[in-house]
Image: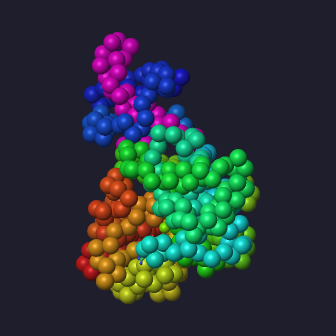
């Protein structure tokens, strides 16, 4: 039994006891109905009994019309289920995928080339199979929009690579058949729905091949909004001040609950928190290693306009969002280069990183200050570029990006 707060005329009557199993999915919320029913409401979630507070709509819970104990129609708010199964499944899947990727890195195998000329490795396919298998086993109704598909692996001249993918997946799932593995990879071909997962099995494949940073990036989207994100960063040092120290971190963010940093090698857990400085000399900008991925000269102009003096940090993949989330840097921008001004970003390149940073106290928008819209398809078609920051300096960055 779980308590539901009943809201009537913007007041709250004593809690009713109702069975949580009656409650619909979070994605069933009608955004407007929810907002109308909850304007000004003060709600106590069970986990926060002692700290009554106004919570953002997204965290309030599921709003439903019910009859109260006197038989009167009223609006009730049920606590959002804690996403226990989602977080457990996501952590286990990303940990397993990280292990697979590190195995491949030690073998130093040759990458393949996709039709768009970008590189892909057996680890990209293996990691997508592992994560999609776990999602299909636990959330069979949820589509997954992933970066890879199995077309290339099914070509007759790719038998050797396919055999390697099968062997890698079987290290983790010994009973897996080749057909099942192809099927799991193609589970990543899902279509956007009111609730879906998005996956980049290896974000920063160029960094992965070079021996630098990369990330396994998985996020859950409900009603177009990020609700959970996980970034597995096997090559990221636990302590950024000790770059040669122990490596391997997983960042886990759940909407309204902060961002946890979990070690990939032991059970240590800490909370990620941005560095909230706005002082120009203290601010750090982090950018891609690959110069073509963003307009570097505009980034230098931005740094100059703010009065920043620190040299840029360079890092592959969404590990950049994690670096801002734990205070290692303060600004990450993705500005389309002049030869591709209308370039739109892939959802899987930003979903997990964005919620990891937001829940650590940072802010993420596009270059015009608009929130990222994850409801439109595989690309962020409504958003131009990305501005991610420690929050404090965000409006100053937008002032520059709107004008330039
Ligand atoms: P980075 O954050 O620079 O390490 O880049 C990783 C992501 O950049 C990849 O996941 C790709 O989707 C994306 N990417 C690949 N090529 C380009 C390009 N020419 N311009 C912008 N982004 C790219
Ligand atoms: Mg990527």
Name the residue nearer the viewer: 92 or 355: 92
Q: Is residue 314 left or right of residue 159?
A: left
* Colour theme: rainbow
Residue at 44% in and 72% down: 115
Where is residue 208 drawn, in percent x and y?
60, 73
Where is residue 21 drawn, in percent x and y?
49, 25
Q: How many marks?
A: 0
Where is residue 145 drawn, in percent x and y?
45, 54
Residue at 54% in and 50% down: 183
Q: Quadrant of the C terminus?
A: bottom left
Residue 92 lies, with reference to residue 28, above or below; the image says below
Residue 354 lies, with reference to residue 292, above or below; the image says above
- Residue 397 is at least partly visible in this image: yes
Name the residue nearer the viewer: 167 or 280: 167
Residue range highlighted in magenta: 57-86
Residue at 60% in and 49% down: 180
Residue at 64% in and 70% down: 236
Q: Is residue 87 left or right of residue 381?
A: right
Where is residue 82 drawn, in percent x and y?
53, 39
> Which residue of the protein is positioned furthest toward the front in this rendering?
156
């Amino acid at each position: 039994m779980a308590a539901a707060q009943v809201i009537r005329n913007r007041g709250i009557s004593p809690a009713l006891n109702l069975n949580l199993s009656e409650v619909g999915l979070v994605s069933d919320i009608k955004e407007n109905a929810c907002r109308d029913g909850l304007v000004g409401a003060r709600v106590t979630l069970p986990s926060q009994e002692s700290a009554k507070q106004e919570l953002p709509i997204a965290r309030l819970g599921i709003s439903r019309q019910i009859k109260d104990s006197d038989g009167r129609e009223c609006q009730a708010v049920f606590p959002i289920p804690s996403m226990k199964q989602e977080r457990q499944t996501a952590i286990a899947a990303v940990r397993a995928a990280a292990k697979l990727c590190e195995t491949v890195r030690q073998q130093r195998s040759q990458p393949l080339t996709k039709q768009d000329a970008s590189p892909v490795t057996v680890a990209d396919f293996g990691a997508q199979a592992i994560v999609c298998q776990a999602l299909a086993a636990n959330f069979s109704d949820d589509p997954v929009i992933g970066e890879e598909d199995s077309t290339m692996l099914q070509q007759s001249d790719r038998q050797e690579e396919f055999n390697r993918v099968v062997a890698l997946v079987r290290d983790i799932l010994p009973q897996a058949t080749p057909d099942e593995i192809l099927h799991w990879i193609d589970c990543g071909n899902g279509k956007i729905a009111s609730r879906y997962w998005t996956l980049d099995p290896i974000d920063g494949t160029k960094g992965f091949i070079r021996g630098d940073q990369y990330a396994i990036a998985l996020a859950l989207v409900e009603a177009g909004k990020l609700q959970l994100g996980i970034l597995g960063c096997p090559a990221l040092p636990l302590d950024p001040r000790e770059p040669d120290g122990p490596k391997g971190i997983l960042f886990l963010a759940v909407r309204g609950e902060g961002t946890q940093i979990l070690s990939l090698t032991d059970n240590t857990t800490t909370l990620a928190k941005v560095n909230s400085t706005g002082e120009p000399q203290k601010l750090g900008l982090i950018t891609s290693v690959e110069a073509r991925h963003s307009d570097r000269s505009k980034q230098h102009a931005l740094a100059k306009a703010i009065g920043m003096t620190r040299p840029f940090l360079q890092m592959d993949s969404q590990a950049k969002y994690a670096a801002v989330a734990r205070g290692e840097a303060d600004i990450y921008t993705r500005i389309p280069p002049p030869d591709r001004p209308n370039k739109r970003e892939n959802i899987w390149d930003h979903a997990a990183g964005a919620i990891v940073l937001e829940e650590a106290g940072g802010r993420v928008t596009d270059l015009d200050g608009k929130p990222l819209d994850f409801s439109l398809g595989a690309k962020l078609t409504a958003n131009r570029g990305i501005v991610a920051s420690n929050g404090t300096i965000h409006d100053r960055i937008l002032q520059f990006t709107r004008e330039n």
